Each structure stands twice: as structure tokens, then as C-alpha cells.
Amino acid sequence: MPIAALTPREAEVFALVCQGLTNKEVAAKMFIEIASVKFHLTNIYKKHNVKIRAQLFSKANEGVEA
């Protein structure tokens, strides 16, 4: 997935989510509200045309498996 399409904050959220962290854990690690994590995830989903976290993981791993 091209990370360049994301803002720096979205990229940070994306990286933490890809590590398997929950929204609550991401919020705590980034010192932001859970609502902010959800906001960033919504933007990430829109930019990559997905609706749920599982689809995001799938897209992120498309180029990884060879």
C-alpha cells in the first residue's frame, strides 16, 4: 500500500494498527483521543477504498507475499 498517500499522522495510526493494536491502544500510545484514532482510520479507509480493518490489512499485505 502506498503510504505516501497518507498524512504523517495517518501513517502513524496505520503503522500501529498494522501491529495489531486496538483503537484504544493506539490512542494511548499516541496520546490522542479514541475519536481521533477513528477519524484518522476513516480517512485511511476512504483513501484506500476499504470499509473495514480486515480489508485494510489485506490491501497492506498484497505486495508482501511473493
Image (cartoon, rainbow, N blue to C red):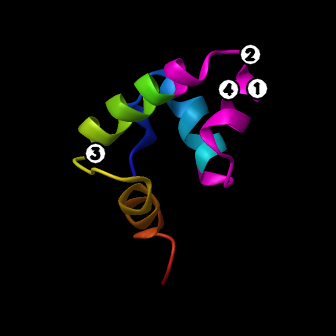
Q: Are marks 4 and 1 in contact (CB under 8 Å)?
A: yes
**Residue beneath label 3, please?**
48
Where residue 5 sits: x, y (%)?
35, 33
- The secondary structure that dominates the magenta segment is helix
Query: Of callouts 3 and 4, which one flags the residue occurring earlier in the amino acid sequence?
Result: 4
Would you identify the image quadrant in which residue 45 lies?
Answer: top left
Q: Work out how far the residue at label 2 is from the one at label 1, CA to CA, in angstroms.
A: 5 Å
Where residue 32 sits: x, y (%)?
66, 15
Query: Of callouts 3 and 1, which one flags the residue occurring earlier in the amino acid sequence?
Result: 1
Q: Residue at 53% of width from left, 27% of height from top? A: 37
Secondary structure beneath dot 4 equals: helix
Q: Is residue 24 magenta?
A: yes
Secondary structure beneath dot 3 equals: loop
Span highlighted in magenta in the image: 18-37
Where residue 39 sits: x, y (%)?
42, 23
Residue type at mark 1: give it. Ala
**Residue beneath label 4, please?**
27
Query: Does 18 sit above or below residue 57?
Result: above
Q: Work out how far the residue at label 3 is from the one at label 4, CA to CA, in angstroms.
A: 22 Å
Q: Are marks 2 and 4 in contact (CB under 8 Å)?
A: yes
Secondary structure beneath dot 2 equals: loop
Q: Are marks 3 and 4 in contact (CB under 8 Å)?
A: no
**Residue beneath label 1, please?**
28
What label does residue 64 carry, if any? none
Q: Are marks 2 and 1 in contact (CB under 8 Å)?
A: yes
Q: Work out how far the residue at label 3 is from the one at label 2, CA to CA, in angstroms.
A: 25 Å
Secondary structure beneath dot 1 equals: helix
Residue type at mark 2: give it. Phe
Residue type at mark 3: give it. His
Front position among marks 3 and 1: 1
